[in-house]
Structures are given as C-alpha cells and as structure tokens.
Image: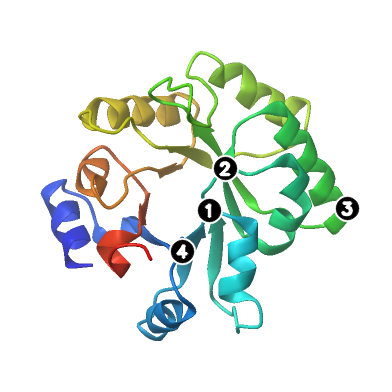
C-alpha cells in the first residue's frame, strides 16, 4: 500500500520495517486468491475455522498465517498446528493450553501478548498492571517465549496515547514486535513504532 510508505517516511522510518498483515476476516476465497497473486504473503485470521476455509489445500510456501482474533483454550492445539504466529495470548489458561499443544505437536509458533490497552471490559487482553507478572509467568511457569505485544485501542478515542503506551511497554520489556494499527489508525500506529499493522477493509474493501 502506498499509504504505508508515505506514513513510514513521515515517521522517518523505513517502509520495509513495517509488515502488512492482511486481515482477511469474512473475505471470499476469490479475494484471497487475488491477494496471493498480487504477492501478499502475510495473512491474519480472527477464527481458527476460517483459516481452514481460506487456506486449506493451498500451497503455503512462503506464506505466514497469524492468529489475530480471540483464541479459545480448547482451540489451542488447532491454532498451534496451523498458525505461524499467535498474537492473542492473554491469560494463563490459554498459556497452559498453548504450552501443552506445542509440546504435543513439536511446533513453536511465535507468540505475542494481547494487551487490553484501554482497560475495556468487553475486550480481550491482559491489563497493563498485570502485564509484567504475566510475561514473567509465561517464561518461568509455562516455558513460553514472547516476541511482542498486540493491542486494539478504544474506538472513538484518539489512538495516539494508547499506541505511545504500547511502545513504552514493548521497550520496557525488551520486546521487538508491536502489532497495532488497523485500517482507520495504522498511520498513527506507524508514527508510534508499530512493526506490524493489521489491515482489512483498507486493503480488501468493506467486509462481506
């Protein structure tokens, strides 16, 4: 997307340091075909079932699949089997389920912790005050390595302060990946250091 390059240059960043994750929730297989043909290689899915609908039977050489939606603990084994990255690790029960699934399957997808950056009761994510202890437990108790953080800021509020806090949290905990920013606010996210932006409607058009 041209807008990513412009936003990166405005933030004095290299466009190649920002990864476009194509959020393909509810999109048709024809649209996925077109994205693959255009060279898009990184896709985000909100549901385990939908990733099978979109990608089962395809040649996935060079393709990275990322789980970006809320993940049920009972779906942990399926998620570990198919995803390269799971961005929505947010509670001890899921950590245990993922650790068990990784040991069983011999696979270690990259993990990001989802932070409930706006402290919204209706949203998934670990709270900011609980984050340090959660990160400590993930490594010490569950043997899980975390690569970064993910968030969805509150709607209808300026996203900048939330993205700024996420940047501080990532730096404080020495985490390299910062998945934040979607179609409406990815330019702001880039300003505050997003390494991965999850774009759906701005890339594919409105959802079906």
Left or right of residue 143: residue 51: left
Of the pair 9 and 95, the residue shown nearer to us: 95
Above or below, comparing residue 80 to residue 156 in the picture: below
Q: Residues within 10 Å of mark 2 (few under 14, many from 20)?
A: some
Contact? badges 3 and 2 (CB < 8 Å): no
Residue topped by disc 4: 26
Residue topped by disc 3: 104
Contact? badges 1 and 2 (CB < 8 Å): yes
Distance in Å between CA atoms under marks 4 and 1: 9 Å
Distance in Å between CA atoms under marks 2 and 4: 15 Å
Residue 43, x across and y down, in percent: 47, 65
Residue topped by disc 1: 46
Q: Residues within 10 Å of mark 3 (few under 14, many from 20)?
A: few
Looking at the rendered structure, which numbered label has been put on residue 70? 2
Going from N to C along the chain, the mark reached first, 3 or 1, is: 1
Residue at point 38% right, 83% down? 34
Going from N to C along the chain, the mark reached first, 4 or 3, is: 4
């Amino acid at each position: 997307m041209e807008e990513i390059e412009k936003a990166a240059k405005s933030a004095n960043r290299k466009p190649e340091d920002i990864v476009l994750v194509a959020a393909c929730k509810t999109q048709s297989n024809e649209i996925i075909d077109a994205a693959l043909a255009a060279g898009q290689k990184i896709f985000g899915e909100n549901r385990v079932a939908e990733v099978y609908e979109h990608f089962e039977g395809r040649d996935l050489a060079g393709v990275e699949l990322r789980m970006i939606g809320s993940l049920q603990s009972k779906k942990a084994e399926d998620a570990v089997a198919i995803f390269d990255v799971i961005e929505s690790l947010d509670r001890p029960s899921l950590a245990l389920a993922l650790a068990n699934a990784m040991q069983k399957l011999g696979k270690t997808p990259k993990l990001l912790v989802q932070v409930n950056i706006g402290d919204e009761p209706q949203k998934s994510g670990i709270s900011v005050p609980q984050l340090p202890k959660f990160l400590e437990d993930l490594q010490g108790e569950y043997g899980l390595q975390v690569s970064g953080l993910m968030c969805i800021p509150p709607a209808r509020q300026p996203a900048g302060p939330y993205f700024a806090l996420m940047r501080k949290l990532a730096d404080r905990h020495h985490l390299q990946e910062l998945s934040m920013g979607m179609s409406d606010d990815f330019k702001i996210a880039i300003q505050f250091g997003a390494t991965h932006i999850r774009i759906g409607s701005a890339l594919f058009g409105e959802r079906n």
